[in-house]
Amino acid sequence: MSVVLEGISRRLRTEARTESLTSFVANSIAIAVLVLLFIAVTLRIAPNFLYPYPLEAGDGGMLSSAWRVATGSPIYNPVQHAPFVFNIHSPIFIHLSAFILKLFGPYAGGPRLLAELMLIGASFFVFLTTRRLTGSITASIVAALVLPLERHVVRRSGLAICDFCSLLFLMAGVYFWVVGGKWRWAAVASFVLAFFSKQSAVLVPQAVMLTALVERKRLRILLYEGAYLLLMGAGFGVCWLIWGKAFFLDTMYYGTVTRFDPWVGFLSILLTVATYPLFFIAAGWAVMRAFRRKTLIPAALLPAGLIQAYLVGNAGASHAYFFDLSAALALSMGLFWPYLVAVMERTQARTRRIALVFVVVQAVLIFSAALYKSEGRGVFLESQIKGEAQHVSMYERPGMVLSTRTGYDLGRVGMDFTTDPHRLGQLLIAGLVPREEIERLVRERQFSAVIMPADEDPLGIFDANLRRLVEGNYRQLGQTRKEIYFLR
């Protein structure tokens, strides 16, 4: 690592000696601001790695699933009987997290740190790709820092989620594709690994491989697509041998059972455009120059990223749907930066100052939008831990716990009755899981404890009938502002 940093530092000094005063000022401000913002974001999410309990639904579900794998339990199951253990995500990150938990014990920080290192790895491949396309170390640093600072990425940073694992393999594949030659076969393999990290990672590989049409390599694209499908088939075959039909049921069917609001995706994209006008100007510039080859990759990634981002309209979808778009914007900004600096050099001093102010304001927008409602626990770490004491105590007894929050069974004798309450709620609403099964378990007092939302349950699990059954069959232990606790 020190050798890499020394090489980057040497290249930066070389570029600084050969650039004009305007370029030097613009580059220095851009890198300084982005580095400071990166430090601020890192400090913001650092307490997450020490926080012992789930931070939100996706984090908790992944921790619970990884812990079950670490203790030898299957996570791909038909959702018909309790415990409703299933996972709609592909297996790579889950099993890597399970390995970490098995190696270091039931500490939530392990899978979270693993995910964050994968995000840094994805940023490094963005750096390498930009460096390959522009030859500018400054532009490469700008691109590499834009990705982890984009607000959708920051809001999922510091969590145990599979999305950064998928992003790492996607960006590695993009880099190998840009290198060209035999490395494109490595790109195809990396794209397949991205899919088996998160099964929605299909648009970016297709967009990248279709660039072979612009390069007039029509026969090659058939070979690459053939290799991609062959490796995908091999991967599905391995999954069938290990998990059988349950794998396909969980990842290909249960993952699609959800309500979709088309306006949510549209408005979310519109908000992103309003937040990052400079990035979308860079993306538009890349599209207009796509046939010059250098900007072909970010131009191809942009529509793939926009389509993926639009799917955030799925009920329960997270900011991770924007990650492909974030990568496209980062690469576009890296390629656009030398052009922007060159334009500033040719303009009058007043225009240069306005442009620099615009760049700084855009950087501040990155910071404010990124940290707004991010999942960092910051100074609230100690109070958050104390506030979870009652909830955690419900898992100190053997048996299933009926709750809409998961991940608290990490290293405890109590067990979540489901690894994905939100998706289970969607399946209940769709009628694919019988409510009578949960009601029967409550009547027969099969749950060792029940943690019921104090207000209306937005997930749809605790309907009016289930609430009455819980109150009639369990004794109330206590209540907080958000939850009511019951024991049998």
Image: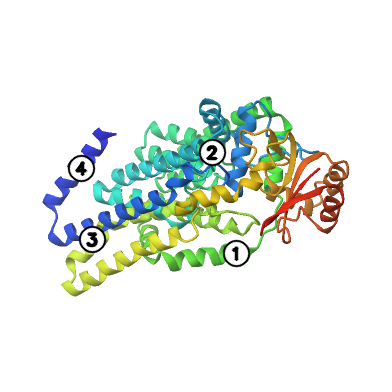
> What's under tag 4, amino acid-wise?
Ser
> What's under tag 2, amino acid-wise?
Ala
Is the Cβ of the residue at disc 1 closer than 8 Å to that at disc 3?
Answer: no
User: What residue is at 39 percent from the left and 45 percent from the top?
Assistant: 215
Q: Which residue is mark 3?
A: 341
Q: Secondary structure at mark 4?
A: helix
Q: Which residue is mark 4?
A: 9
Is the Cβ of the residue at disc 2 closer than 8 Å to that at disc 3?
Answer: no
User: What residue is at 44 percent from the left and 68 percent from the top?
Assistant: 274
Observer-side mark, 4 or 1, equals: 4
Q: Indicate the position of residue 251 as horizontal and vertical percent values.
A: 66, 40
> What's under tag 1, amino acid-wise?
Val
> Label 3 crowding class (10 Å Cα cut-off): few <14, some 14-19, many 20+?
some
Q: Secondary structure at mark 2?
A: loop
Q: Which residue is mark 1?
A: 264
Q: Secondary structure at mark 1?
A: helix
> What's under tag 3, amino acid-wise?
Val
Q: Which numbered marker is on residue 108?
A: 2
> Label 1 crowding class (10 Å Cα cut-off): few <14, some 14-19, many 20+?
some
Measure the C-alpha gap from mark 4 to mark 1: 43 Å
Measure the C-alpha gap from mark 2 to mark 1: 32 Å
Observer-side mark, 2 or 1, equals: 2
Measure the C-alpha gap from mark 4 to mark 2: 35 Å
Q: Indicate the position of residue 2 as horizontal and vertical percent values.
A: 25, 34
